Amino acid sequence: MVGAVALSGPAYRLSLERLHALAPRVRAAAERLASIWPAARQREGLRAVSRFEYHQPESLVEAIALAERYGAEASFLAGGTDLIVQIERGGMAPRHVVGLERVPGLTGIETNGRIALGARVTHRAIERAAAFAGALRGLVESAEVIGGHQVRNVGTVGGNLVNASPAADLVPCLLALDAAVTLVGPGASASCPWSASFSAPTGRPGVPTSC
Ligand SMILES: Cc1cc2nc3c(=O)[nH]c(=O)nc-3n(C[C@H](O)[C@H](O)[C@H](O)COP(=O)(O)OP(=O)(O)OC[C@H]3O[C@@H](n4cnc5c(N)ncnc54)[C@H](O)[C@@H]3O)c2cc1C
């Protein structure tokens, strides 16, 4: 919730009272938009956007339990640059979306003896990692050509791999570097060569479940 919005100068200052006064009108406009939106999308030949329940687990165990509970009706959400676009286009309609932003331990870049990237490491973080020189420079070069700044700021390694687009820029580099991927399931985890886990896209993303 936004308490006050200050742009510049007193003329632009919205007090809390003014926001409260505006709230019913904003809500009415949002409801009106929600009621005409599906018809407008249909006129444009687009499918209705699915509604989903959003979950924000605070641990990996909780995230995996949610994915297990809702099965094929659930999708993980990292940066959302693939998933949200697919939902918007009607290509995917998960009933449950499991956000990973509160799950700790997924954003680290380990460069101590071995190189390990957390699933939620962004393309921007790879670009900025000073340790990626020499043979690993290809990783930076792959990350820095992905989309624009906005996409690289939120798009992640995990999302790029699991989405498995034939145009995914990190995939060829990780295959060339013989990367391994850590798969985590209920009560177990396994490290597999990415080349063994990677499969041609089937038209919808899939999480590899075993090596
Ligand atoms: C304008 C635009 C330009 C783009 N340009 C490029 C480009 O040049 N090159 C390129 O390669 N890609 C590009 N992309 C695609 C996208 O940005 C990348 O694939 C990105 O890495 C996806 O990561 P994400 O975190 O946003 O994934 P999300 O959209 O959050 O997720 C993608 C898929 O992976 C699953 N997932 C995510 N994280 C996990 C996890 N930890 N475990 C299991 N499943 C998971 C989700 O459920 C979903 O199915 C572009 C996208 C946009 C919108």
Image (tube, helix red, strand yellow):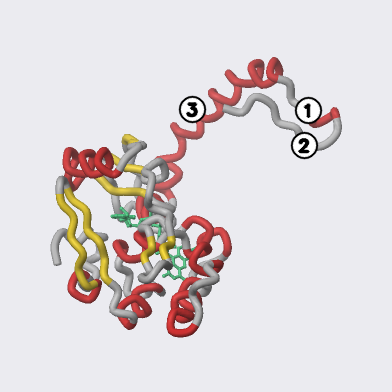
Along the horizontal axis of the image, is 131 left or right of 47?
right
Sequence-wise, the earlier of marks 2 and 3 is 2
Residue 62, located in which quarter of the rendered image?
top left
Sequence-wise, the earlier of marks 2 and 1 is 2
Sequence-wise, the earlier of marks 1 and 3 is 1
Quarter of the image with the C terminus is bottom left
Disc 3: which residue: 31
Residue type at mark 2: give it: Leu
Quarter of the image with the N terminus is top right
Q: Which mark is residue 7?
A: 2
Mark 1 residue crowding within 10 angstroms, few (<14) / some (14–19) / many (20+): few
- Please tell me which residue is depicted at 48% across the width and 71% down the height of the picture: 143
Residue type at mark 3: give it: Glu
Mark pair 2, 1: CA separation: 7 Å
Residue type at mark 1: give it: Arg
Q: Name the one closer to the observer, 102 or 104.
A: 104
Instruction: Give yes or no for contact between labels 2 and 1 (Cβ–Cβ under 8 Å).
Output: yes
Q: Quadrant of ligand 1?
A: bottom left
Percent of width and height locating residue 131: 50, 72
